[in-house]
Amino acid sequence: MIVAKNLSKSFSDIKAVDDINFCIKKGEVVALLGPNGAGKTTLMRLLTGYLQQDSGETNIYGINISENRVDVLKKIGYVPENAPLYPEMSVYEYLHFAASLRGLKHDDLHINLAEVVTQMQLKDVLNQRIDTLSKGFRHRTAVAGALIHKPRILILDEPTEGLDPNQKHEMRTFIRRYGEKNIVIISTHIMEEVENVASRILLMNKGKLICDTTPTSLKNLYPDKNIAETFRFMTSEK
């Protein structure tokens, strides 16, 4: 479970995250929506402890992230947009490295590595250098690295950006399945993706959480509009 209470973060005079509250439970796939500059990336970085909030708090399965970030990160896998990798490593070397950073050893390491290779369909490129991979396989490698310790929370920024239609379908199928027993948070601008994978939407604008709902309920707010039109209507300058 993720509980955010009165979470706020500013950069100079810009309120990137403004007094946000929500609770996310196991089994939810949450789409974090908002226009550019809404505060989505800042919120994800607060949830993962990469940024320190100015006020409020975040509790991950009962642990305050500000007080015990190391324990919290054991439960989280995070893939930022354009996730940095080590281009000189092979896929196998990178995943082994990611596993070692998480403290996995011996049997757990080999079992988990085999599972993420299967999940992300990396078998054919396992011994290939990362700098020779297509964008789709680089992205799969980054996700596999975030999955190596079997996190209970998976946070993905633009999870299908740059993927071809088949790869998008495979990634969305994976997200739905992983979200059945865990928590998945995705940030995306693709409304089709929201309708395809999300059970819940957190809609942000100008640092504020303006709507906490489901895809169906969001569409029903304005029956004469589709979800993309509703998004534009709710986040446009009035």
Image (cartoon, rainbow, N blue to C red):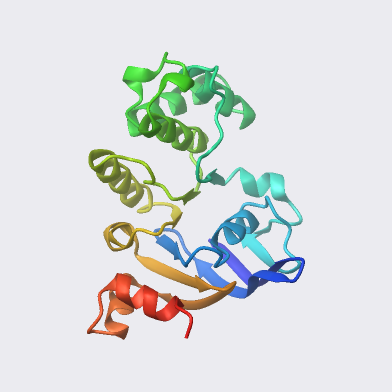
Give the residue furthest to the top: 127
Q: Quadrant of residue 57?
A: bottom right
Residue located 61% across and 59% down the image? 42
Q: How far across and down, in percent of the image, does residue 220 sit?
A: 27, 82
Q: Quadrant of residue 234?
A: bottom left
Going by the image, does 225 lie left or right of 88? left
Going by the image, does 238 lie left or right of 84? left
Give the residue furthest to the front: 237
Q: Who is closer to the viewer here, 56 or 91?
A: 91
Q: How far across and down, in percent of the image, does residue 182 sit?
A: 43, 52
Residue located 37% across and 42% down the image? 162
Q: Quadrant of residue 222?
A: bottom left
Residue located 28% across and 63% down the image? 195
Q: How far across and down, in percent of the image, does residue 33 sit?
A: 44, 65
**Is 11 rendered above or below residue 182?**
below
Q: Who is closer to the viewer here, 195 or 58?
A: 195
**Is 58 rendered above or below residue 211?**
above
Q: Who is closer to the viewer here, 134 or 74?
A: 134
Count of numbered labels shown in the rendering: 0
Going by the image, does 12 lie left or right of 188? right
Would you say residue 91 is visible in this rendering?
Answer: no
Residue located 34% across and 65% down the image? 199
**Is 46 rendered above or below residue 90?**
below
